[in-house]
Image: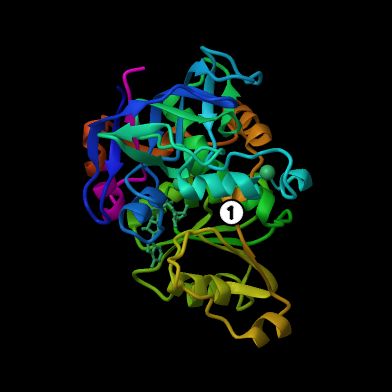
Amino acid sequence: MPRAAVLREIGEPLEVLDLELEEPKAGEIEVTIAASGICHSDLSVQRGIVGVPRPVVLGHEGAGIVTRIGRDVTSVSEGEHVVLSWVPSCGHCAWCRRDEAYLCASGQQAADAGRMLDGTTRLQHDDTHVHQMSALGTFAERIVVPVQSAVRIPNDVPWELAALIGCGVLTGIGAATRTASIRPGDVVAVFGCGGVGLNVLQGARLAGAGRIIAVDTSPAKLALATRFGATDAVNASEVDSVAALKELTGGVGVDVSFEVIGLETTIQQALRAARRGGQTILVGMPDRDAMIPMRALAAVYGARTIRGCWYGSSLPQIDVPRILDLHERGEIELRALISGELGLDDVNRGLDDLAAGSATRSVIRFGV
Ligand code: APR
Ligand code: ZN
Ligand code: ZN
């Protein structure tokens, strides 16, 4: 019986429970989790900002070993190491056929429902079905997932680094290299330099941006941002960030602004910071009532682009190996994202540290 951190009621701490786990069915695999990052989206689910059916095992940024395979599974075998993706892609819906696997219709439906692609669950506690966040639930010792959620990686990649790739790294680097169109020398601003925003910064550097301006309220995050490619830092708790960005760009505004927090106020700031003809990329997950606060005329008259970014427009099967390659060649940082490691029983402390802003990425390590 695997142990797993379960959310029963919104706002309550997670409970570590022994769960019953069924065998993988056709097209599914069992993964023994080795490491899982704690991301702001886990906190958003716990706080009820993002709704998922409960009870639910949280966690959507993980890596582990394939320990069983279901019928018809040919793309991975037992013993292989995998990074988990939080959008299982079916491979044949209208979006998968257009190379937009991150928008896969049936994958998103399963992820939102916290169930497998066939609509059923594999976990139980006292005869109650337990859901899996994003069809994963990586705050667990063992889970069953759709095989489409797994990306094979070499066996020598450290687990704590592999885990982070599944959400923060793919989303952040993808936002800069896939969602946005950054041209060499562009001036970029990134609002929010947490686990995801730091990856947007290093993605902007990879895309050839010139000046890369980090905006955050935390001096510690701004200091870290320079290691991830930021050339300038704006402390939004001390100055008006939009005025500061205008000043840094001779009154013009930035070519590309990224919002990586999910607040209406910072979305508005990111919109106001972009120059006429510029782009604003919305990465942070807003709550369901938040609006995009902008006059339509400012978009039309200013020829501005606003793009929503889901999972960094990533194609995990292609992008995970690319990220590992970039890391091996020293082009990107991964280890510096980790602010601490903890055990599954300390998961609530990890969530509290993220809420308090004292953690970048806490990584839960399992006994693998
Ligand atoms: N102005 C500037 N920075 C801010 C502000 C603000 N008003 N409020 C918060 N921040 C900074 C925090 O100091 C922190 O560095 O935003 C950062 C958020 O980082 P994390 O909490 O680590 O969140 P992260 O995991 O990076 O996720 C960011 O992306 O995937 C989504 O759901 C996720 O919406 C979340 C966003
Ligand atoms: Zn995440
Ligand atoms: Zn699909």
Find residue 43 and report its horizontal and vertical position in percent: 34, 52
Q: Can you say whether 292 is above or below 164 in the image? A: below
Q: Residue at x 52, y 52 (%)?
A: 230
Find residue 358 and report its horizontal and vertical position in percent: 28, 49
173 vs 219, left or right, is right
Q: Can you say whether 104 is above or below 18 in the image? A: below
161 vs 102, left or right, is left
Q: What residue type is disc 1 on?
A: Trp
Find residue 143 and report its horizontal and vertical position in percent: 42, 28
Q: Residue at x 58, y 25 (%)?
A: 26
Crowding at dot 1, Cα within 10 Å, few <14 / some 14-19 / many 20+, comes out as some
Q: From where the camera sits, is residue 205 visible?
A: no
Tell which quarter ligand 3 is in: top right
Question: Would the CB of label 1 be found within 8 Å of ligand 1?
Answer: no
Q: Magenta region: which residues?
A: 350-368
**Residue 281 on the magenta segment:** no
70 vs 360, left or right, is right
Q: Quadrant of the C terminus?
A: top left
Nearer the observer, 192 or 20: 20
Q: Which quarter of the picture shows residue 91? A: top right
Find residue 63 and report its horizontal and vertical position in percent: 46, 28
Q: Which quarter of the picture shows residue 365? A: top left
**Residue 357 on the magenta segment:** yes
Q: Residue at x 78, y 47 (%)?
A: 98
